[in-house]
Image (cartoon, coloured by chain):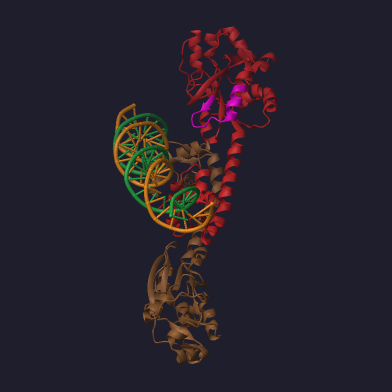
Chain colours: A red, B brown, C orange, D green
Amino acid sequence: MKSRFRHHDLLRLFLEIARHPSFSEAAAALNMTKGAVSYQIKTLEAELGMVLFRRTTRGVALTGEGVKLKDACQGHFDGIETQLSALRGKLARSLTVGVSTYFAARWLSPRLMTFMQAHQDVQLRIQPMIEFSDHEVQDIDLAVRWGNGGRNNGVVTPFLPSPAYPVGNSDTARLVDELGMERAISQLTLLRDRDDSNAWSDWLETTGLPQQTRHDVLIVPDPNVRVQAVVDGQGIALMDDLVQDELEAGKLFRLSPAELSDYGYFIVQPSYAAVTEPARIFSDWLLSQA
Amino acid sequence: MKSRFRHHDLLRLFLEIARHPSFSEAAAALNMTKGAVSYQIKTLEAELGMVLFRRTTRGVALTGEGVKLKDACQGHFDGIETQLSALRGKLARSLTVGVSTYFAARWLSPRLMTFMQAHQDVQLRIQPMIEFSDHEVQDIDLAVRWGNGGRNNGVVTPFLPSPAYPVGNSDTARLVDELGMERAISQLTLLRDRDDSNAWSDWLETTGLPQQTRHDVLIVPDPNVRVQAVVDGQGIALMDDLVQDELEAGKLFRLSPAELSDYGYFIVQPSYAAVTEPARIFSDWLLSQA
DNA sequence: GGCATGAGTATAAATTTTTTGAACGCGGTG
DNA sequence: CACCGCGTTCAAAAAATTTATACTCATGCC
């Protein structure tokens, strides 16, 4: 238990040195001094309790034990390095992007083809993501988040401004028409995206309407589900221009001209993830598409 | 090419740390501080350009990449360590002893059985050795050499004194009888064991006979061959009591009472070889048999 | 809700390991 | 017989690792 796994680098170095006919040549090839090579091999020999090289005045040659050791290890180290570079390579060309299904379906999907064609070498995975906290357990390299940019840990870059405004179905819209927003809102369920989201209170502040402590708020984290809930008359929600289709089809109605103008989509580079080349590329592409 | 193979120990350490649910626990198990563990993993992550662990406030868990890396390396490292200990184990129980065929046949052979029986776990190999310089290329752990102990590089232990005296066949013996040693010797070929051996000149000095520069010396390195050459009347040689059989059979005759009393057999522990357990055991056994 | 707990991290100092650079000894070569 | 190239050695320097300590943060327990 005294020495804890401290000889694998030495073994790897030994394999390299064993390829040369002398310590001096090996040292030159490896950018070391011959003294260092001598020291390292001496250390390894002591560690293993065997003599690996026969020293002569013209150079060195492996002993029988040296040859056996070389044969025993070479394959394994080659294997490690092969798999390592395979992993590195695969990693260097793959990218997992966390997005909501809402954003994926309504904005990303239609444009994705152009990215795929321009960067066929990038292995892209679109990972559905509801809660932000999910990325921590899903090994996401990059995320696209909706909101006003706050409350994210990582590097946040705004890329697609998309003001949010309240929408409702036709019945709701009629109610707002009849009673006016201030009275109607007290009768409607406010659909929220997160427990701690302050989107509604931000919006109320924007309009000058009174803040209200309410009990009937309903939390529907997934925007697609939230849209459907609104269509079904479950309440009203703050949505953005990505519901264009529903607005045009008459399934949803904008209830107020007031909007949260600083809301939109942000690229989040999680603080725990390394900034890989594909992440940069995808990030740039997103910005170019906004 | 900047970093030369300096991450295999880190990988091995990573495998070990990955077995624990937290850096703190891993650190305790490995006799390190958690700071050291944190530092090492950070180093490895930087080296590989990937994040291996997800850090939470309760501990750590492997990321997807961490799992892949672990799976990729575990087998290879296990393989290395298995083969290493196999090699170490085999080595620790094997022993190659360099001896002349002469000594092997006439002294060692008859006694070897007792050693084999007493140490059945030692894998013994008797390596024929003519020239001393041979051991350098034959990975010999221990050698038995004849002579007066000089001219060996390594630790030399005298173990079997065996004075050398001149022997000849019956014709030669008769010649010496008739002419006396001093006159006879000038007519006889002196068989030598090595080019640079001074056994004959040592002997001549012992007897007080004049040194002679001669042209007809014949070098026969192998003692068995030398014995045969003497029997065949090729000349005279300095031999020891291991030719007892030939003396008793009347095939050889001792030509003079003068002998080289400091000659005999020596155990040589080559300076380049590690002193292994079996080498020590065999060495002790030799001494006990003398 | 406050606060002790245990996790990973950060930092600087201490310690250990490795490398360097300049002898040196050895042995083969011209 | 001097020279050259090679491996070794040694002290000093440099680099790496470990330690000790403090810090942040989320969790769990009153």
The image quarter containing residue B161 is: bottom left
Q: Position of residue B263 (x, y in %)?
A: 40, 77
As drawn, B65 above or below B135: above
B257 or B53: which is nearer to us? B257
Residue occupying image coordinates x 46% and y 65%:
B92
The image quarter containing residue B159 is: bottom left
As drawn, A67 above or below B244: above
B190 or A180: which is nearer to us? B190
Q: Which residues are magenta?
A: A268-285
Q: Position of residue B191 (x, y in %)?
A: 50, 78
Q: Position of residue C28 (x, y in %)?
A: 51, 57
Answer yes or no: is residue A223 visible. Answer: yes
As drawn, C3 above or below A25: above
Answer yes or no: is residue A224 visible. Answer: no
Q: Is residue B4 magenta?
A: no
Q: Position of residue B285 (x, y in %)?
A: 41, 76
Q: Is residue A272 magenta?
A: yes
Residue A76 lies left or right of residue B286; in this view the side is right
D17 or B220: which is nearer to us? B220
Residue B203 lies left or right of residue B77; in this view the side is left
B231 or A57: which is nearer to us? B231
Quadrant into which the N terminus of chain A falls: bottom left
Quadrant into which the C terminus of chain A falls: top right
The image quarter containing residue A165 is: top right
Q: How many marks?
A: 0
As drawn, B59 above or below A258: below
